[in-house]
Amino acid sequence: KADFRPWVDQDLQDDTEITAKEEEHGDWADSHEEEDLLHVPYSPPRYPEETMLQRSKDLYTLMNQRRSVRFISPEPVPREVIDNVIRTAGTAPSGAHTEPWTFVVVSDPDTKHQIRQIVEEEEEVNYRQRMGDKWVNDLAKLKTNWIKDYLDVAPYLVLVFKQTYGILPNDKKRTHYYNEISVSISCGILLAALQNVGLVTVTSTPLNCGPQLRILLKRPANEKLLMLLPVGYPASDATVPDLKRKPLDDVMVHI
Ligand code: IYR
């Protein structure tokens, strides 16, 4: 199985079956344990068509400048900006509004270095063994390898964990429906929020580093690492591969 789809992280399988089994043990909350929820009026801003068109162009222009950047400046970034970016990520929709995410923000140099050691050690095995020749060849054009300077250099590392279940104040477990897709959406919003303030990152998914990083960062057993995002300004000599995006006609079908 691992040989067939080597990019599937061993710790990141879908938890549906495990959850269904554990449910029989009885420490799961029933839905009636949560209160009734009031429904209130909602009226977000509505723009004239001309404004809509302009705003749609402006956001596209901004987001089309986003690139995965592996060369990050050590220059410090205001902590409050990071807080707001994480707040923004936390506005994502989630299954049954369970908000199944934990964003671990690391700026401590020693912890960053320990993260680097764990990631580089596993990534070397990934590149040399787990990924296989086909995958390594498919990536060759990106000139990546297992050496990740940015893990020491970036002022912040944001490790995004998905909570596979929640724990209620009465210690019962709460089902986190669609937790992986919910957290993935929040990561997309996080990327947009970073782009909005001129910061860069690379969406890294360090294969099979999750359990070690979870323990290093003292996160509980219900949390699994989904993504590791080094965050900062781009280095002044940063380069990116000269990739092109598919035109609209190749990605959209209008029926
Ligand atoms: N996770 C590895 C390898 C890697 C995989 C893919 I798919 C990429 O688009 C880029 C890299 C790494 O971070 O080097």
Image (cartoon, rainbow, N blue to C red):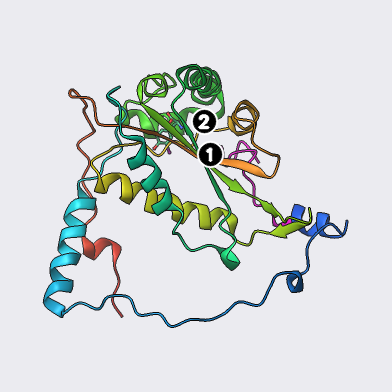
Q: Is mark 2 on a helix, strand or loop?
A: loop
Asked if residue 159 lies left or right of residue 178, the reply is: left
Res. 26 in view: yes
Beta carbon of the mark 2 residue lies under 8 A of ligand 1: yes
* Residue at the right extreme, as displayed: 25
- Foreground pick, 142 / 177: 177
Residue 253, horizontal then vertical, whole percent: 30, 71
Q: Does the magenta stretch include residue 129?
A: no
Asked if residue 66 lies left or right of residue 8, the reply is: left
- Give the alpha-carbon distance from disc 2 to disc 1, as whole Å: 7 Å
Find disc 2 in the rendering and name its residue.
131
Q: Does the magenta stretch include residue 2?
A: yes
Residue at the image position 13 percent from the left and 67 percent from the top: 54
Range of magenta residues: 1-17
Q: Is mark 1 on a helix, strand or loop?
A: loop
Asked if residue 206 lies left or right of residue 67, the reply is: right
Beta carbon of the mark 1 residue lies under 8 A of ligand 1: yes
- Foreground pick, 162 / 31: 31
> Which amino acid type corresponds to the residue marked 2 in the rendered image?
Met
Residue at the image position 27 percent from the left and 75 percent from the top: 45
The N terminus - image quarter: top right
Q: Return the mark for residue 7.
A: 1
> Which amino acid type corresponds to the residue marked 1 in the rendered image?
Trp
Residue at the image position 35 percent from the left and 80 percent from the top: 43
Which secondary structure type mostly characterizes the magenta part of the structure?
loop
Residue 196, horizontal then vertical, whole percent: 25, 49
Residue contact at pointers 2 and 1, CB within 8 angstroms? yes
Bin the neighbour count of mark 2 within 10 Å (Cα to Cα): few under 14, some 14-19, many 20 and up. Answer: some
